[in-house]
Amino acid sequence: GENVEQHPSTLSVQEGDSAVIKCTYSDSASNYFPWYKQELGKGPQLIIDIRSNVGEKKDQRIAVTLNKTAKHFSLHITETQPEDSAVYFCAAKDSSYKLIFGSGTRLLVRP
Amino acid sequence: NAGVTQTPKFQVLKTGQSMTLQCAQDMNHNSMYWYRQDPGMGLRLIYYSASEGTTDKGEVPNGYNVSRLNKREFSLRLESAAPSQTSVYFCASSSAGAATNEKLFFGSGTQLSVL
């Protein structure tokens, strides 16, 4: 089955800097890759997703890139703000159509 | 518009006790899911229901049962709770068909402790 690895587990950046979180997946048939943000005490919330026929997708300060050959995808947050502090999860929808999540990255944006 | 509502928010059980976690969504979604979240392990799928009347096992179904009561409600039952089931449980819903397992809307979670 699909295995999704996520790095780093924790990330601390200065406000205004960029943050990058990386994930690798094992199932070459996976075709859908979402990113979820989880704030303290809340459920995860979808922030951006990408399909395997697209290499990059942007939404304001957030972007996701996908490298199908290397089987990895990344979340890029530019001009980070304190409200970006949260736990971020990547995921991959595998050939059995199940969504497999990474282990999460705790992002801290220092004011 | 409440989205996905889970009850209870917190629960403490003794080993061997049973309980049911309730979940309801008001977005007219066909698909519903139960996940558990453990430190350092992300979210793992327990069971899901692609549409009313169907349920399927996820990654970690042992020790759990589910009921899709109607289109709105999807419950998770622990028949004989074990300490290994201490976790935060999330219910989620999404549209069906090609969008199944995509664009999930999550509830706020149930923190369960089994002593």
Image (cartoon, grey):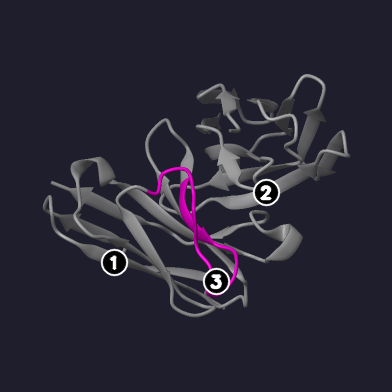
- Dots 2, 1 in contact, CB < 8 A: no
- In the image, are marks 2 and 1 on the same chain? no
Query: Does B48 appear in magenta?
Result: yes
Q: Chain letter of disc 2?
A: A
Residue A59, percent across and down?
Answer: 80, 46
Q: x%, y% of residue B101? A: 63, 54
Would residue B71 appear left or right of B10 to someone viewing this image? right
Where residue A9 sits: x, y (%)?
50, 24
Q: Residues within 10 Å of mark 3 (few under 14, many from 20)?
A: some
Circle nearer the N terminus (1, 3): 3
In whole angstroms, how far apart are the C-alphas of marks 2 and 1?
30 Å
> Which residue bears the numbered disc 2?
A47
Same chain for labels 1 and 3? Say yes or no: yes
**Residue type (three-letter) at the residue carrying disc 3:** Gly
| First to last magenta residue range | B45-61
Residue at image mark 3: B3
Front-lying residue, A104 or B73? B73
Q: Relative to the observer, which residue lies in front, A7 or A87? A: A7
Q: Is residue A37 above or below residue B49?
A: above
Q: Circle 1 marks a residue in which chain?
A: B
Dot 2 amino acid type: Ile
Is the residue A63 above or below the residue B71 in the image?
above
Q: Is residue B42 visible?
A: yes
* Residue shown at the point (62%, 31%) measured from the top left: A15
Residue A85 seen anywhere in this rendered image of the structure: no
Secondary structure of residue under mark 1: strand
Query: How far apart in space, not on screen, are marks 1 and 3 (Cα)?
Result: 20 Å
Q: Which mark is residue B20?
A: 1
